[in-house]
Amino acid sequence: MVSQPLRFRDVSSSSCYCCEKESLKYICQVEDYAAAQEEWEAVQCVEPILRSPYKEDLHKSPKKFINGSSSSPAKSPSMSPQALAPNVRITPHTDFDEVWDFFTRQDMSHVMGTVMIMANRASWVTKLSQCQFDNSEPIHLQILQTVYKVLTGTKIDCPRFGNHWDVIGFQGVDPATDLRGVGLLGLVHALHLLTYEAVLPLARDIFRLSHDQHSQFPFMVLSINVTRISLQTLREGHLNKECNSRGNVRHVLNEYFTAVMFHIYWIWKTECKTIKDSGFLIKDAEAYCKRNVKTVLQKLQAQLRKYSHQEAEML
């Protein structure tokens, strides 16, 4: 980072040496810290911002970000039009099945030139990973708004650009920047996690942990990275056995994505990891989950059964 040691004017040689030594020590610490960030295995240029999300009173209670209701999050919120202020919008929620049905009926030829040659059953997954977020597409905006509103519990649409996106773990004022590496698939995977009722309790737990003062991490950056891991696992053929036995690629990929999210969450929580551990954790998780597809899927199902039993007991 610095090719020459720092020097100061009008000091003795010994003082200069001490200053150089302390400066180099500081530089090494900065380099180590930067290396820890790079080890996050981020999508393209996405790197976790190591800052507290507790900047405003709104951020201090993650429990109110995700509604604890057991009702389906995909249902559109209801609010009287008369109660809305001018220029306030409420975009109806969408869910994974609705989005998938929409895209399978669209002409995706504009991304065919960049799509890898894969089995026909996996082609739509690959196309989504190559399809970039487009502000002129209402469905893209609807997905983004659904993800934000389900996580935060708000009813009205949020601004397209702004610092509010870091509440759910994006890294800047424009979520589209973070999605460049995995395309719209990164957003659709998050939508599945948040609108599929069986896995919603897991989504709640992961999001709450992401706002824990000790464990905090950028939720959407983690989700995007797990999409990258899942897509790579599919491309390398590690999911072939499951896909062939079920005859369905998207369901297997969604379940594997959720299983990797749970695997990382469980280690992060039980071993009290922090953002500084993220690089090693993500790397190890990727290697383990690729080698043990069946095991991680089974562990996910066991956890989902626990959630189901807990909800039944509460009722």
Image (cartoon, grey):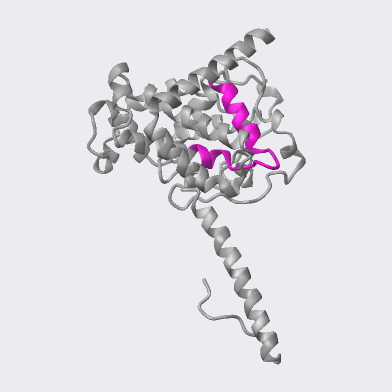
Q: Name which quarter of the figure residue 86 lies in.
A: top right
The answer to whether 100 is drawn above or below residue 175 in the figure is above
Q: Quarter of the image containing the C terminus?
A: top right
Residue found 45% across the figure and 26% down from its top: 296
Can residue 87 be seen? no
Describe residue 126's horizontal placement relative to residue 32 as left or right: left
Describe residue 129's horizontal placement relative to residue 8 as left or right: left
Q: Position of residue 247 (x, y in %)?
A: 29, 18
Describe residue 40's horizontal placement relative to residue 105 as left or right: right
Can residue 213 be seen? yes
Disc count in the image?
A: 0
The answer to whether 269 is drawn above or below residue 201 in the figure is below
Residue situated in front as seen by the camera: 309 or 84: 309
Q: Position of residue 154 (x, y in %)?
A: 66, 29
Residue found 61% across the figure and 41% down from its top: 273
Residue found 24% across the figure and 34% down from its top: 118
Residue situated in front as seen by the camera: 98 or 160: 98
Residue found 38% across the figure and 34% down from its top: 290
Q: Position of residue 210 (x, y in %)?
A: 63, 38
Q: Position of residue 228 (x, y in %)?
A: 41, 40
Residue situated in front as seen by the camera: 3 or 47: 3
Magenta highlight range: 197-223
Magenta span contains residue 206: yes
Magenta span contains residue 230: no
Q: Name which quarter of the figure residue 85 lies in.
A: top right
